[in-house]
Image (cartoon, grey):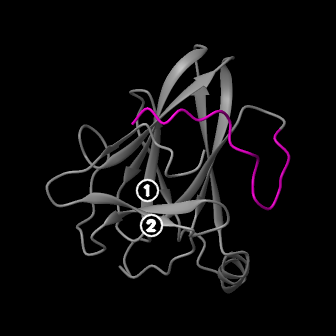
Amino acid sequence: MEAEHYSKAIGDKNITWTIIPGYGRTLSGIMPTPVTAKSQTPGGDSPHLEYTINLTDTGKIDIQAYISPTIDFTNTHGLRYAISIDDGQPQIMNINADQSQATWSMDVSNNIKKITSAYQVTKPGRHLLKYWMIDPGVVLQKLVINCGGEKASYLGPPESFYWPGK
C-alpha cells in the first residue's frame, strides 16, 4: 500500500499528516507534522493512519514498512513508530535500532529502511491496519503485507486494489 492511500488520517489539535508528493521510491511519503511535535503514546485517538485491508486467510503475516532513513535527532532512544491490527496492542518499532555504520551506509545508498514486524491474524476478512505516530520526523513511503511467499524486489510488490474511500 502506498502510504498516502490510507482510509483515514487521525491527527489532533497540534499534529497533522503531510503528504510529500514524488518523495521516495514510488508515489510519495507521508509524515506527521510539525517535526517539532512531542513524542506520542500509541493507542486510542493518538495520531495514526488507518488502512482498511482484506485478508483471505488466517495465520502469521509480516508487515514491512518502507521508511526514509533519518538520523536520530533526539539522541535518546531512536525514532519510533508503531503498527497494530484491529484493536491489537501497537507493536513499537525503532528505525534507529541498528546504529552501525554499515547499516546506515546501506540505508542511505538504498534511500530506504525496510523494517518488518510480525502479527497473528485469527480470522479472515476485513481488518484495520493502524500506523501510529510516536516520534516526529519518521517518513513512511509504503506498507507491504506479506501473507507468505512474497518475493524481494527493489520497489516492492505492486499495490493491490485501492479504493479512495477517505
What are the residue bounds of the magenta stretch?
150-166
Residue at 58% across, 34% down: 119
Q: How many numbered discs?
A: 2
Q: In the displayed structure, would residue 95 be above or below residue 147?
A: below
* 120 vs 53, nearest the viewer: 53
Alpha-carbon neighbours of circle 1 within 10 Å: few (<14), some, or many (≥20)?
A: many
Q: In the displayed structure, would residue 30 be above or below residue 7?
A: below
The span from disc 1 to disc 2 (Cα, nearest Å) is: 7 Å
36 with respect to 5 (left or right): left
The quadrant holding residue 68 is bottom right
Does the magenta portion include 160?
yes
Does the magenta portion include 20?
no
**Residue bearing mark 1:** 81
Q: Main secondary structure of the magenta part?
A: loop
* 101 vs 4, nearest the viewer: 4
* Residue 141, position as x, y percentages in the image: 56, 59
The quadrant holding residue 161 is top right
Amino acid type at circle 1 is Tyr
132 with respect to 115 (left or right): left
Looking at the figure, which quarter contains the C terminus?
Answer: top left
Amino acid type at circle 2 is Val
Residue at 52% across, 52% down: 3
* Residue 55, position as x, y percentages in the image: 63, 22
**Residue bearing mark 2:** 138
45 with respect to 156 (left or right): left
